[in-house]
Image (spheres, helix red, strand yellow):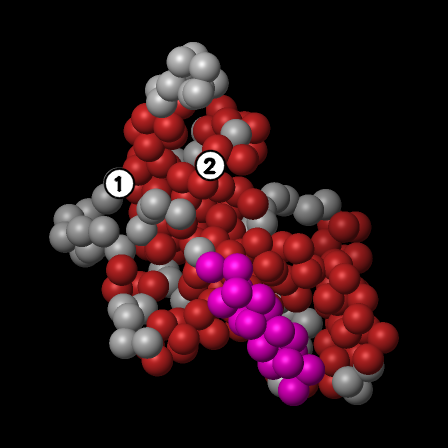
Amino acid sequence: MVLSADAARQVERENAEIARGLKLQDPELLDRLIELHQHRLMRYLMFLTGKREVAEDLFQEVWIRVLRRGSQYNGKARFDTWIFTIARNLVIDLSRKRTMSSLDEMCEGGENERPFEVSGEEPSPLEQFEFRENASEIAAVLQTLEPSYREVLTLRFHEELSLEEIASVTRAPLSTVKSRLYRGLAALKPRLQKLRSIPNVSGEVAR
């Protein structure tokens, strides 16, 4: 999403204000940030973990980290990008404690097996429209995808982060983000089609 010059300056001012408030550990600022970002953050954690109880625990831990380490936020990046990064690191830490593979290691087939070429930097407008229009169906199907694909699709379409911001959150090269995005879309389409072809209780095909 490209911002106008005025909108970009406004975002910079807001980020600078948040950075100052966090350095001062302003409790009112923290309350406003939680109210503003709670739904998106919880949704992101739910998609990553697939379990509400775990997501709720990590949600609390994210804001504890924000309070304790607020001085580390310098306002140069969007605040939501920063908290998504914190959330992702907490999920990875939890996975390692449970002797599970990290998100980066759980990519189906491995991304380094062969080069993956994409036709452009963004999915087509039709793909973006379909993703948003079918959000309820896609939310269920996303849980069946490899975590690295699920994460990039969630950040791109639900949270509307740019590819560069996703690269920052996931600490992956931009080319890897593009690869995961297009591979994720490719894996998503046949699963959605299969879901829609399952007859419902009345014997009609789901639409």
Say whether residue 20 is magenta: no
Disc 2 secondary structure class = helix
- Residue 100: give x, y in percent of width and height: 28, 71
- 123 and 53: which one is in front? 53
Q: Is residue 106 left or right of residue 59?
A: left
User: Do labels 2 and 1 touch, CB within 8 Å?
Assistant: no
- In the displayed orientation, state which residue is furthest to the front: 201
- Give the spatial CA distance, label 2 vs label 1: 25 Å
Disc 1 secondary structure class = loop
Q: Amino acid at mark 1?
A: Glu
Q: Amino acid at mark 2?
A: Ile
Query: How busy is the neighbourhood of tag 2: few (under 14 within 10 Å), some, or many (20 plus)?
Result: some
Which residue lies at the image location 35% right of the left edge and 55% below the top edge?
Answer: 148
Which residue lies at the image location 62% right of the left edge and 74% below the top edge?
Answer: 60
Q: Is residue 48 left or right of residue 194?
A: right
Q: Quadrant of the N terminus?
A: top right
* Residue position for label 2: 138
Residue 120 sits above or below residue 26 on the image: above
Quarter of the figure with residue 49: bottom left
Extent of the magenta region? 51-68
Q: Taking the image as drawn, is residue 181 in sight?
A: no
| Circle nearer the viewer, 2 or 1 | 2
* Residue position for label 1: 117
